[in-house]
Amino acid sequence: SLISPVAVPYGKALLDGPVIGRNRRTDLSVACEEGHLLMALNLCHAEPRNIPLPIAPEADIAAIRTLEELTDEYLQKNGYSLCIVNTGGNHANLNDDYASVPAEMKAVAKALGGKVLRGISKEELVKIMPALRRTVGDRAVMRAMHFLSENERVEAAKSALLAGNIEEFFGAIVASGNSSFKFLQNVYTTQNVEEQGLSLALCLTEEFLSDRDGACRVHGGGFAGTIQSFIRREDVAAY
């Protein structure tokens, strides 16, 4: 079927990872730049799956587990399940799509005198945007803006969890997913616009949630594979 949702505890989905086709991966969505961990709640920019990530310090791993446990406990307390929805799709020819994300971001960073975007402000980016559009292109600029805003959304999501505000937490999830779709542009590949399983799954899920509480977004590296949907437990069977 198009959508095959599996309700799992949030933390288990992040730390153990689902089985997607023949590729088993830990879908923690950890993105590292020179050893610095840029992670929280699967809200970071996509990392190429064929490039190994640096090993995170033990302190960062401990922080991740603490936040993961908080998220899991919070969703259970509020009556939600995280559904990992397998939309199918073929990852075989997506290496160029995945590789383009960090490559374009680093091209923007280089134009601003850095190696990576960490440490660069949105104000700096906007200031030279006309020149960047000519040299690296509009998509690279939007991907860089996504990256810089995404780190802010991570903090907003964390604060919402700590404050016990489910609406703000879902707001951060939805904002992140919308930014991924529009600015990071990792929901479908331009190599094959006829096949858009992730887009269609998000479309159907948003329709399902139009008169219900919940949230959804692309899951993991994108371009094909899975979305994540936060569904109230009593609605999971219908979903």
Image (spheres, helix red, strand yellow):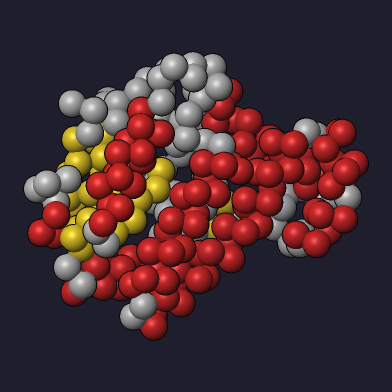
State the residue in front, 72 or 234: 234
State the residue in front, 12 or 178: 178
Residue 168: in sight, yes or no? yes
Answer left or right for 141 relative to 129: left
In the displayed orientation, state which residue is furthest to the bottom: 163
Task: State the residue at coordinates (49%, 57%).
Answer: 175
Task: State the residue at coordinates (53%, 64%).
Answer: 153
Q: Taking 64 as reference, is 188 above or below it?
A: above
State the residue in front, 81 or 33: 81
In the displayed orientation, state which residue is furthest to the front: 211
Q: Taking 50 as reference, is 93 above or below it?
A: above
Where's the N terminus, which quadrant?
Answer: top left
Q: Position of residue 205 (x, y in %)?
A: 29, 44
Q: Position of residue 14 (x, y in %)?
A: 32, 53
Task: State the residue at coordinates (29%, 31%).
Answer: 87
Q: Position of residue 38 (x, y in %)?
A: 55, 58
- Picture quadrant where residue 96 is located: top right
Where's the C terminus, which quadrant?
Answer: top left
State the residue in front, 181 or 47: 181
Q: Position of residue 117 (x, y in %)?
A: 72, 52
Q: Taking 216 as reference, is 36 above or below it?
A: below
Residue 64: in sight, yes or no? no
Answer left or right for 51 relative to 204: right
